[in-house]
Amino acid sequence: MNNSIKEKQPIIIALDVSTLEEVKTIVEKLSNSITWYKVGLQLFLAQGNSVIEYLKSKNKNIFLDLKFFDIPNTVSHAVKSVLPLDIDFISIHALGGAKMISDSREMIEKNNKKTKILSITILTSMDKLTLNNEVGILGEVEENVLRLADMAIKSGSHGIVCSPIEIASIRSLDENAIITTPGIRFKDDSIDDQKRVMTPEDALSLGGNYLVMGRSLVGKDNAKNLIDEINKLVGL
């Protein structure tokens, strides 16, 4: 499979597990149907670089979702620390501000790496009540998402992680931004702990590039058929 086709595939499977054996089971089950996988805090803290090495050995694209969020110097050097892993995407929190993002982008450019920054705006588990009353950020969720996305893109972020509800608005900010969205569910799925969700068809039609899917896809007996149907939506 050539790289252009691999990068066009819209599904990123979230590896929400803790062991390498579980990862291998998922990858083997999905076989050639999936080329993108997301490694988050749970898995990376449990298995470290071994899971990255395994996915690379299978010629998979990797989104390392560690959600860096600290002072600019710390985050930019954290980015530098993971660059030797030769991963495709890393996530950082837009709430860290413009300098944190620009310094991280500069670190990637200095080291001549292909890794791209995806900036997280407002977590898809948050609604207005959580954002306003618990976190203390006033205003509507979408207006905060757009403000953070605009700042992040202008500061050098290659793309944005947002809920599917905000895809169209962010696409209007930058037609070339990589928009990656969790909160994807099929019509008959439980939404679990997500607050802002959408079907794969609707998210792609609004301009999303990548759909992060885990529990709602991996556990289904007909997962490969569902993946094929989603791939058809982007001409694969």
Image (spheres, helix red, strand yellow):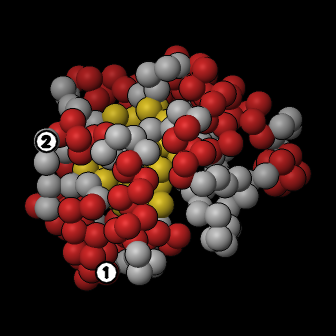
60 or 1: nearer the viewer: 1
Give the percent coordinates (x, y) of residue 76.
38, 35
* Residue position marked by numbered label 1 in the rendering: 22
Placement of the C terminus among the 4 image quadrants: top left
Front residue of 132/179: it is 179
Residue shown at 43% from the left, 45% from the top: 233
| Left or right: 155, with 12 as reference point | right
Q: Secondary structure at mark 1?
A: helix
Q: Position of residue 200 (x, y in %)?
A: 54, 52
Is 200 or 28 nearer to us in this picture? 200
Q: Report how far apart the C-alphas of labels 1 and 2 lie in the structure.
A: 27 Å
Residue 63 in view of the camera: no
Residue 25 showing in the rendered view: yes
Secondary structure found at label 2: loop
Residue located at (19% from left, 44% from top): 86
Residue nearest the observer in this picture, 75 or 62: 62
Q: Which residue is mark 2?
A: 2
Q: Residue at x 11, y 61 (%)?
A: 57
Q: Amino acid at mark 1?
A: Glu
Q: Amino acid at mark 2?
A: Asn
Q: Quadrant of residue 94?
A: top right
